[in-house]
Every structure is written in C-alpha cells, then in structure tokens.
Image (spheres, helix red, strand yellow):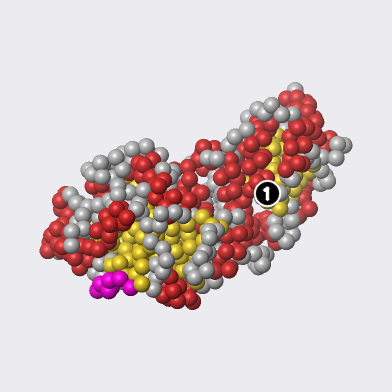
Amino acid sequence: MPIKTSIATVSISGTLDAKLQAIAAAGYDGAEIFENDLLSTHLSARDISSMMADLGLACTMFQPFRDLDGLPEPQRTRAFDRLERKFDVMQELGTDLLLLCSSCSPIASADRAHTIADLHEAGERAAARGLRIGYEALAWGRHVNDHRDAWSIVRDVDHPAIGLVLDSFHSLSRRIPSSSIGDIRADKLFIVQVADAPVLDMDLLQWSRHFRSMPGQGDFPLDDWAQAIRKIGYDGYWSLEIFNDRFRAGSASGVALDGYRSLRLLEGGIAKPSAAAPTLPPRATTTGVEFIEFAASHEEAEALGAMLRPLGFRPTARHRSKDVTRWTQGAASIVVNCEPEGLAHSFDMVHGAAVCALGLTVPDVPAALSRADFLRVPRFEQAVAPDEWPIPSVRGVGGSLIYLVDAASREAMWAHEFPHALEPEAAPLLNGVDHIAQTMQYEEFLSWLLFYVALLDVEKTPQLEIADPMGLVQSQAVENADRSVRFTLNGSLASQSLTSRFVQNYFGAGVQHIAFATSDVFAVAEAARADGLPVLEIPRNYYDDLEARWGLDPGLIERMARLGILYDCDGEAEYFQFYSRAFARRVFFEVVERRGYAGYGAANAPIRLAAQARHKPEYLD
C-alpha cells in the first residue's frame, strides 16, 4: 500500500492559501500547518480547515509548540495557558496532533522526573479535548536532543495522548544509529518527518535552518532510517519538513512537486530498492545516449555543421518526411531539426539554436514511462504521422524533451526514420557522448538533481564548487552504473558568471556543452584544428605549471600547449580534454580522453572558465 504523504507548509514559499493549493495539486494526502503561516494569513483557522477539506487534504499536524517541559514557575503556568490556546486553534483547524519540541530554554530543568510530569499533564489536557501531542527531540535541545531519550520519556509518561515524532534531520545530523528505532512502539510513533541534507561541519541549528533538502538531494543514509521505521510497523504519515533558502526563493508548485517526488523516491528506495515496496515502478535503467537533438533555423544549422565537421561528424541521413538531418561520428548521433513548426521550432524561437531534446536508450520503455507517471513527470504528446516511428518522451530540463528509445529496436528506428542517405560516414575519431553539461538557475539546481535521481537509475558524485572569474559555480554529476549516461549540473548565484549569463541569455536552463569521448584526444585535436574548428586558447602559464606539478615529458607539454589540451590525473589515472569556442554564443563542445579516470577534470574548470571569460562577447555577452 502506498505511503501516506504530507508536507509542512514551512517547506515552500508563498501565502498559506497558495501553499495549500500547490500541495494539493502536487498530490499529497495532507499538510502540516506551520504556526507562522497561520499567523500571517488573513484567513481564519476555520477557513483554512474548510479550504483543506475542499482540496482533499488532511491537516496532519499543527506545529511547533516550543519550551513546555522543565520550566519553573511562573513560566510553567504561562506555558500551559499558551498550550490551551493552541488546542483551541487545533480544533478550529481540524487536526488532533500538535508537535511539541524538546525544550531549548536556558531555565529549563534537567530533572527527568520534572519533564515526565509536564508531559503527563499535557497529555491529560490534550486527552480531555480528544487531541494528541507528539514529542520531538530537537538536535540542539537543551537536555533532550536524542530520539532515544525522547522515546524513553514518552514510554515512561505512558499516556495515550503522548507519542513520539521522529525527524530524520534531528537523528541523522547527530549520527544516531537508525537501528535504535527498533525499540520504538509503532502505536506511539505519531508522525514521521523527513528531510535530507548535505553533510556539513557546522552549527546544528544553522545547518537545519538553511541546508535541509528533499530526500535524494543530500547525503543522509535515509534508506536505512526509513527501513528501520517500516520494520516496526509504522503506517502513518511521512511528512516533509524542509528549511532551505533556495526553496523559499522557488515557486510553491515546483517545490511541492519536487517534495512529492522525493517521498516517492524514498518509498521505493534512494540508493537501494526498498523490500517494502516491490510493486513500485523501479528507477529507469539507461544504456546510453542515443542522440542529441538541436533545434535550428537553416542558417543556424549551417553554422552548426561548420562546428561539427571538424570533429568528424558528417550529415549521413535525412528524415523520411521532415526537415531533419542526422549527423554521425563514431557512436555519436546529432539530430538537427529545422522544421518550420512544432516543438523544435518553438524552442528555436525562444532560445535560438540549442539542444531541444535528448534520446536515452532504455531496455524497457513501458517501465520507464511507468516510473515517470509514478513521479508525475509529464509526458510530451504530439501528432505522429502514420508512417512515423513513435518515440515516447517526457519533459526534461528547461522545457526540453527526453526521448526513451527502445534498446532492442534502435537500429530499426534509425533505418525507418532516416531512409535518405546523404554523405558517407567519416573515419571514426569519437567513441560517443561522454557527458552532457546542463546549466540552470541556482535555485533550480536541487530540483533537477532530484529529477534525474528519482527518474533514472543514476548515482550522484560529490558536489563541487568551481571558481569562475566572476563568482563560484556549484557543480554535481549524476551517472548510471556503466557511465554510459552522465550529466553534469551547474548553477551559480553570481550574476556575471558564465553559468548565470548562459541562463539569462538563453532564457532558462539547458545544455551548455557536450563532451565527446575519444581514445586519442591528440588525433582529434590535430584533425579539428586542421579543419578549422575554433578551439579555446589556454594560457601558457597553465602548461608551465603542469610541467612543474606533474613532471610530464616536455615534448608532451609542448604538444598539449599547441593544441589547447588540458590535463588532470588521479593517481595513475589520466584525463585529457580540449574545448571548442561557443556555437551561436550558447553551446560549446568538449573532447575527452579517459585513461582510467572517473572524474570531469574539475581542477581545469577555472582555467576553462577564465579562458572563456576572455571571449565574453562570444560567450553570452
């Protein structure tokens, strides 16, 4: 049976009524009402209750209530008076559950008996109204900051109206073993709150308030934590509680949908499949990048061809009925779409010549579509002529498409769709697509990271910060198991960085560069220069430093400097790469040779960005 989903209204931006509408539209079963959202709305608690009922949302909890336990008089009496008022609000909201945080007050007593007595009295008052209280150990609580201690208190209070709230952040930020959850009784676990986060060495409160993320976007071992909760028989709500500055800057609908997808990802397993959810559609397996499609006018297509030819691409076939050409080199295929109407034309009108679609090869197309539907990833539907090969697709980054190409029939697809031969293929210089770099607004970064991790069977690499001459760029890659599909995602807060200027001038997120793999980067670089590819020039200082740092052969250094080839190594593994200048002031190409190297040459990224900055009019001025 699917889990019951909920989200705290503090997790998304906007007014309370707008948040609730976004939450309902995303598909949640319920929502926690955050007190500040209620205080700042013009609607009464009864109005909110009525709205949630109309939207089909349960009010899963009212939160938070702070600093009740362990207080001396007269503060204790005032706290219980305040509690009674919150009970009034809860009844107007139509929820029976209140979140009570462990006390952070500097005057709170450490006496456990005092805390138990306070919770027992709170339970008596709640029960008199048919209400419940969930006690949560804040990671920075003054005396109770461990869910094991909170559970022992709840257990010893032994009141039917007092239970436990488990929050993944409070437990995992303190590295509390998830195995300890096995001691908790399922009937006393009133609600589960979920958040992921990057692993940071910082103050717990600041970490929590600014860097929580959706499941799958961070580094917490949520699979083990969730499995421990399932194992005790918990069948209540799984509710997101996310504090993140990026999400507050994003649209309520977008963040709400991301949250829903993240809970579905957690349900099926983030890093490993969940044994408790065997019937859920698994993440889609991919076996390669089948093609990259550019939208372009005829004039732009000619200019693109002038960039592709030096890399060994040739226009080898034309579509059976459309103004679409297939360019091939080795195992790589570029499709150039010059149709005067349809999605590609619209894409070109908005963005200019650019990548409008990617084709990924998958062994099971129906299963991949089922996964997309499960996550509420929209499919793209368009008219298909009777003689055309139908290729299903879903919406991807920046309004682009991801086509799902059946691995078993891919060759038949090409033969059917592109029967008109043009030029013969050139001698293979490239092995295929190595990786595709996509750039987006900083606020969208985690959203697209979640999109790939939730939809495709890929893993994240560690997140990096790369120095652009005009600011920092956040970068992270996702890769499938055999690394035949790799995306690098990039976002920056610096408005003048190359990354940000791409987004501004491109009018949204998209593919900024395509890296092709080769077994001989020097041969490709020689041929590309000879055929007139405009190559990014790298400063001589870089090569002088390479020679000193790595002790490379001086002849090799000279050849690399002449061809603009950059170098990195990791132990015995080596990485060679060079870049073209930008096509249409948007997209540029990279050629890489990996000699056992698994990364992306991050050490060279500042060099590349500085070299591109010297060509600012070309790169998105």
Q: Position of residue 73 (x, y in %)?
A: 75, 24
- Most foreground residue, 153 or 185: 185
Whether residue 71 sits left or right of residue 311 in the image: it is right
Q: Secondary structure at mark 1?
A: loop
Q: Position of residue 317 (x, y in %)?
A: 34, 70
- Most foreground residue, 206 or 512: 512
- Is residue 130 placed above or below 409 in the rendered structure? above
What residue sits 30% from the left and 47% below the top?
A: 585
Q: Which residues are magenta?
A: 421-427
Whether residue 169 sits left or right of residue 235 in the image: it is left
Q: Which residue is mark 1?
A: 28
- Most foreground residue, 257 or 184: 257
Q: Is residue 81 visible?
A: yes
Q: Position of residue 378 (x, y in %)?
A: 57, 55
Whether residue 557 sits left or right of residue 147 in the image: it is left
Q: Is residue 244 visible?
A: no
- Is residue 110 placed above or below 333 in the rendered structure? above
Residue found at the far top of this picture: 74
Under mark 1, the amino acid is: Tyr
Whether residue 514 appears in magenta in the rendering, the answer is no
What residue sits 19% from the left and 56% below the top?
A: 564
Q: Position of residue 592 (x, y in %)?
A: 29, 63
What residue sits 28% from the left and 45% below the top?
A: 619
Quadrant housing the C terminus: top left
Whether residue 223 sits left or right of residue 557 in the image: it is right
